[in-house]
Amino acid sequence: MEPSNGSLLVVSAHAGDFVWRAGGAIALAARRGERATVVCLSFGERGESARAWREGRGLAEIKALRRAEAEAAAAALGADIRFLDAGDYPLVESPELTDRLVHVFRELAPTVVLTHTLADPYNGDHPAAARMALQARVLAQAIGYDAPGEPLGAPPVFFFEPHQPEQCDFRPDVLLDITPVFDAKRKAMECLPAQQHMWEYYTDLAKRRGVQLKRNASPNLGLPHSTMAEAYVRLYPQVTGELA
Ligand SMILES: [Zn+2]
């Protein structure tokens, strides 16, 4: 495989989010030989670990558990993972946390950025993570911002699919074919037993998005297929010399 200069950065509010919503994109980038890095702002220790709380575990134990699960999931996808341990429910926006993200942007020089939608009435941590990711991207572009590294270019930003897309104003304009890596995504999902109820849900979602991908790519011939896909919304305009 030819090495690639691509660098994918995923900014995830909680430890599991990147798996359900962007695992395919991460695995595809890794398989192309690109650097793929997940930054988890928290472990999802308070808000997305209900099973562990019901089992009577304590906060420190739950954080360690979620970290280990997320590390295993990232490894299954071929990604590096970092944890900023900023706390969840609520994930508090702050200049300090945004600055830490600016340092990550400068260090990794991502060529593509994935994060949450800016609206999510079910979970304020997700839009908070998105706002900080977008702000950090802009600050990292400023030559005068005090952080090591070169000013960031203009990596495109894609919002990954929230759990209840209609409520989050999520109308996909990108359908990504993840068929070749779906096995890796499923393995990564199975690294998260704390959220076992999500495995089939996100497998079914990939099938439905796959149907839509086929319909948008070719005539509707009603032929069977096994395409799996993830949906995204692109924030900034596509830049191109040719409409295609
Ligand atoms: Zn989450």
Image (tube, rainbow, N blue to C red):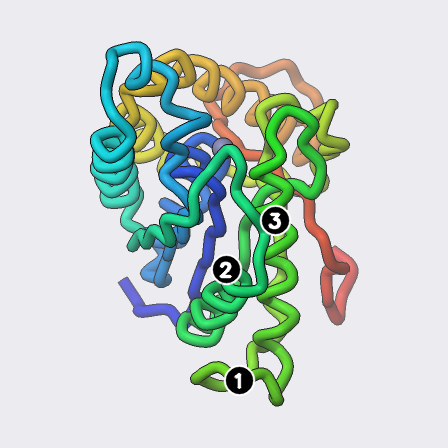
Q: Ligand 1: does it lie within 8 Å of the C-beta at label 3?
A: no
Q: Secondary structure at mark 2?
A: helix
Q: Residue at x 36, y 19 (%)?
A: 195
Q: Is residue 180 visible?
A: no
Residue 97 tag number: 2
| Residue with the mark numbered 3 | 130
- Horizontal and vertical percent position of residue 66: 28, 33
**Mark 1 closeness class: few <14, some 14–19, many ≥20 residues within 10 Å:** few
**Mark 2 closeness class: few <14, some 14–19, many ≥20 residues within 10 Å:** some
Residue nearest the viewer, comparing 243 with 119: 119
Residue type for callout 1: Asp
Q: Is residue 200 visible?
A: yes
Q: Nearer the viewer, mark 2 or mark 3?
A: 2
> In terms of sequence position, does the residue under pointer 2 or pointer 1 come before the other?
2
* Disc 2/disc 3 C-alpha distance (Å): 12 Å
Q: Check whether the beta carbons of the residues at disc 2 and disc 1 lie within 8 A of each other.
A: no
Q: Check whether the beta carbons of the residues at disc 2 and disc 3 lie within 8 A of each other.
A: no
Question: Is 35 located above or below residue 54 in the figure?
Answer: below
Question: Is 38 located above or below residue 7 in the figure?
Answer: above
Screen quadrant of the C terminus: bottom right
Residue 146 tag number: 1
Q: Nearer the viewer, mark 1 or mark 3?
A: 1
* Disc 1/disc 3 C-alpha distance (Å): 22 Å
In-image side of 215 versus 52 (left or right): right
Residue type for callout 3: Ala
Q: Residue at x 30, y 32 (%)?
A: 188
> In terms of sequence position, does the residue under pointer 2 or pointer 3 come before the other?
2
**Mark 3 closeness class: few <14, some 14–19, many ≥20 residues within 10 Å:** many
Quadrant hosting residue 145: bottom right
Residue nearest the viewer, comparing 222 with 187: 187
